């Protein structure tokens, strides 16, 4: 393809006929026609090679008529800058590319902009506006003190089924790839002051757990520590795993281990449980909560269940050994299918399951079993 010089001050016309591209200069439209066969090359010695201006709203339209997958409307094959937005030397205003729908931007439509925010230290932002005066912003910080950090001023909001709102992955198949840090509170801890690091809420926004600190001492609340493991079909070390879907026992049922070993991952023991049925069973390891959700945690948690061993929560008790007072130790009852009962003494033993947080007078109860609150002391 021959190079056609562009003369400053001249006006040039581009045209297309029978799939061929033409360029014509203004001095002689009939004789200066050049045919390039689907290609036009514009070269000039100065930095600006092509200026496009017009009175219409859309100055330039570029689109591909091809239906072939992967066909590019614009192909910028260059080792340097592909598209330069704004002035890299002097910037006194925001520099954005905006993606809008068919409605007018600024009249309540939803649009996205991407670029530098001059009023905020020229930080690079992806900005969404849904109604005038409100916005959600993802900021990729590059100002002093925030290099390569991401800032979410409105938080992370999502509503997608069977997925997580946020996954932090720092993968490199190496022990020097760390997970996450949370900085909060004062630079120097002062007695009587606290920092709130994590708050967990249910679907209605009610706090259910938290991690905070007071003068450097970290507190976890409300706290209940659980083991994970498999429920088995019989009280035997080699019993088959129960593969029933959903919960197997009522919440609060006391469980004992039939087998625990390192058949799983690393030094985390794999536990097998069954409901307690012997009085003062020293194999006790916790109280049944429910089944893990393998859709959230992966195939490694298929048929695994939660067994609480530390903290506080519910426990099923029966009237064996009589009334229970607040503060009494609870142990396993005989032949009860996972119920607890008052322990014979007030000493901590290897068969101690929990400590009752309420009193039970069986003469006033409608049944011989009851779900009560306790603190767990068996795991």
Image (spheres, rainbow, N blue to C red):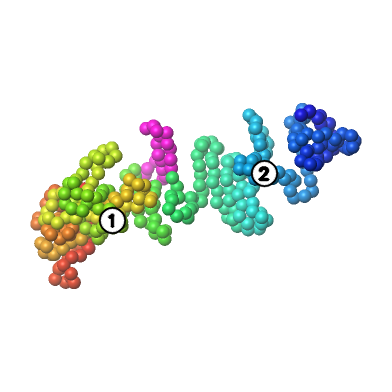
From the viewer's perspective, is 198 left or right of 95?
left
Q: To which quarter of the image does residue 174 belong? A: top left
Task: Name the residue carrying label 2.
Answer: 66
Most common SS among magenta residues? loop
Q: Nearer the viewer, residue 267 or 121?
A: 267
Q: How many other residues sit within 10 Å of disc 2, few (<14), some (14-19) or many (≥20)?
A: few
Q: Nearer the viewer, residue 326 or 30?
A: 30
Query: Which segment is the magenta one?
Result: 168-195
**Residue 277 location, quadrant:** bottom left
- Mark 1 lies on residue: 244
Give the secondary structure at mark 1.
loop
Question: 349 left or right of 290?
Answer: left
Residue 193 counted in the magenta span? yes
Q: Nearer the viewer, residue 214 or 23?
A: 23
User: In the displayed structure, does residue 272 sit left or right of residue 211?
Assistant: left
* Element marked by disc 2: loop
Q: Tag 1 or tag 2, which sits nearer the N-term?
A: 2
Q: Position of residue 86 (x, y in %)?
A: 67, 39
Quarter in which the N terminus is drawn: top right
Residue 125 drawn in magenta: no
Q: Residue at x 89, y 37 (%)?
A: 30
- Seen at 63% across and 43% down, the residue is 68
Which of 84 and 253 lies nearest the eye of the viewer?
253
> In x, y percent, where is residue 272?
22, 48
Q: Residue at x 64, y 47 (%)?
A: 98
Say whether residue 202 is visible.
yes
Residue most extreme to the front: 18
């Amino acid at each position: 393809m021959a190079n056609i010089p562009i003369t400053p001050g001249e006006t040039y016309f581009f045209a297309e006929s029978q799939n061929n591209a033409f360029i014509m200069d203004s001095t002689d439209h009939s004789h200066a026609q050049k045919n390039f066969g689907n290609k036009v090359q514009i070269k000039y010695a100065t930095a600006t090679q092509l200026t496009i201006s017009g009175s219409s709203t859309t100055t330039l339209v570029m689109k591909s008529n091809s239906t072939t997958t992967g066909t590019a409307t614009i192909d910028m094959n260059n080792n340097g800058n592909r598209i330069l937005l704004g002035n890299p030397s002097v910037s006194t205003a925001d520099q954005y590319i905006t993606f809008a729908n068919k409605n007018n931007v600024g009249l309540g439509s939803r649009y996205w902009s991407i670029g530098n925010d001059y009023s905020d230290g020229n930080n690079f932002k992806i900005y969404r506006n849904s109604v005038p005066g409100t916005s959600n912003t993802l900021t990729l910080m590059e100002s002093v003190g925030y290099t390569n950090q991401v800032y979410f001023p409105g938080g992370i909001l999502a509503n997608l089924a069977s997925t997580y709102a946020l996954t932090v992955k720092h993968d490199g198949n190496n022990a020097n790839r760390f997970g996450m840090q949370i900085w909060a509170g004062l630079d120097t801890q002062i007695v009587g002051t606290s920092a709130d690091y994590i708050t967990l809420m249910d679907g209605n926004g009610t706090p259910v757990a938290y991690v905070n600190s007071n003068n450097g001492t970290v507190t976890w609340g409300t706290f209940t520590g659980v083991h994970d493991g498999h429920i088995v079909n019989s009280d035997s070390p080699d019993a088959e795993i129960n593969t029933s879907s959903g919960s197997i026992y009522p919440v609060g049922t006391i469980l004992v281990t039939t087998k625990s070993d390192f058949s799983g991952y690393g030094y985390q023991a794999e536990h097998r449980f069954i409901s307690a049925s012997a009085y003062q069973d020293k194999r006790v390891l916790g109280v049944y909560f429910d089944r893990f959700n393998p859709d959230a945690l992966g195939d490694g948690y298929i048929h695994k269940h939660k067994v609480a061993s530390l903290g506080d929560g519910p426990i099923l008790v029966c009237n064996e050994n009589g009334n229970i007072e607040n503060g009494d130790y609870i142990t396993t009852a005989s032949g009860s299918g996972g119920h607890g009962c008052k322990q014979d003494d007030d000493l901590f033993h290897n068969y101690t399951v929990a400590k009752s947080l309420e009193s039970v007078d069986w003469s006033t109860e409608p049944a011989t079993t009851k779900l009560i609150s306790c603190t767990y002391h068996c795991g």
